[in-house]
Amino acid sequence: MTAAQLSEQFEVSTRTILRDIDALIDADVPVIAERGRYGGISLIPGADLDVNRLTGTESDVLSLVGVDLKRARQLGLEAATRSAAQKLSSRRRLPLPRHSAPALPLSEVVAIDASGWFASDDTHDFADLVAELRAGRRLLIDYRSSGEQAVREYVVDPHGLFSRGGRWYLIADVDGAPRMFATTRLVRWQSLNEQRRIRSDANLAEAADSLVRTLEGRDDVIIVALLDAGSMDLAKRILGSRLLGAETSDDPDRVRIEVGYSEIGGVRQLLQFADHIEILAPAQARKLAGELAAQMATKHQSKPQGGLSVSEG
């Protein structure tokens, strides 16, 4: 490739490319640069690029997000990810054993998308936050809890960022206990001139795993319902680990299911199954479902607010 092509690809000046090439040559990377009309920059033919030449940042980003450019971009690590991916792709493939049928590359037969279904395009940029986290300082954050309008202020000792189901969360200690903060509701943050105060053996992955298990394991209320058998696939997808069990009922067209929630208000999630579900127990959940359904029916019997008219037919 020419220096001009490389400068366009990496969005830097030609002078920067030439300076980087000199640095690579000084580091014994098998790169050659030839001037002239038919010249260019290339690896020495047959040379194999040693992956040990990955920078520390490139190694970190590969272990964290692989070559997922979307997540890397959110973390401010896109350049390192592109660089690492290019180094990996330039490695020479080992020859197949004799008499072996040629195998297609994994990249041609496997595709992975870590984003959640029907999730909005999360364009949040956490590069500044990542820089603060790596400095190991306490944070002052303004956060809005789910379902609330008011914003509260917290002084937190951050463990780091955690990604699950296509969403990002800040894992941080509040008064010594780990909490999970959704970054979409993190209004603002400010670094404090104090080192974070967490146990020396504290681990981000372990703290996140403990919070997830606690959240998914809260089954304070078990709701029993009858669900149309044809809706079971949808229920498994929507309810996930909340679906504790399913068995046949006296009606061959309906399945008896058990769903776990941390509070009785969780029954609202089941209303999306509309007339395909009937809540049986506990009585408080059945009563709440009836009240909510009645409220919905009342709202939809009246004319829409705001002066909108609805045409018939």
Image (spheres, rainbow, N blue to C red):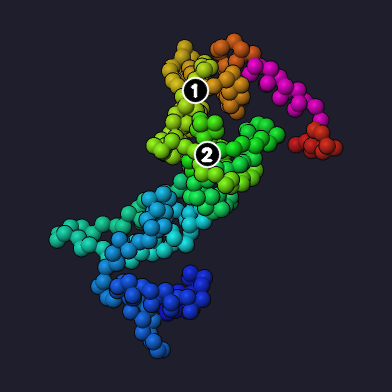
Q: What residue lies at 32% left-to-right and 63% top-to-bottom?
A: 53
Above or below, comparing residue 7 to residue 186 in the picture: below
Q: What residue lies at 57% left-to-right and 43% top-to-bottom?
A: 139
Q: Secondary structure at mark 1?
A: loop
Residue 300 or 6: which is nearer the viewer? 6
Is residue 206 magenta-colored?
no
Nearer the N terminus, badge 2 or badge 1?
2
Q: Position of residue 223 (x, y in %)?
A: 53, 17
The residue tagged 1 is 218
| Farthest-out residue, bottom | 36
Q: Marks 2 and 1, how far apart in space?
A: 25 Å
- Which of pointers 2 and 1 indicates the residue nearer the eye? 2
Residue type at mark 2? Asp
Relative side of 88 to 182, left or right:
left
Q: What residue lies at 65% left-to-right and 16% top-to-bottom?
A: 288
Numbered disc total: 2
* Extent of the magenta region: 288-303
The residue tagged 2 is 157
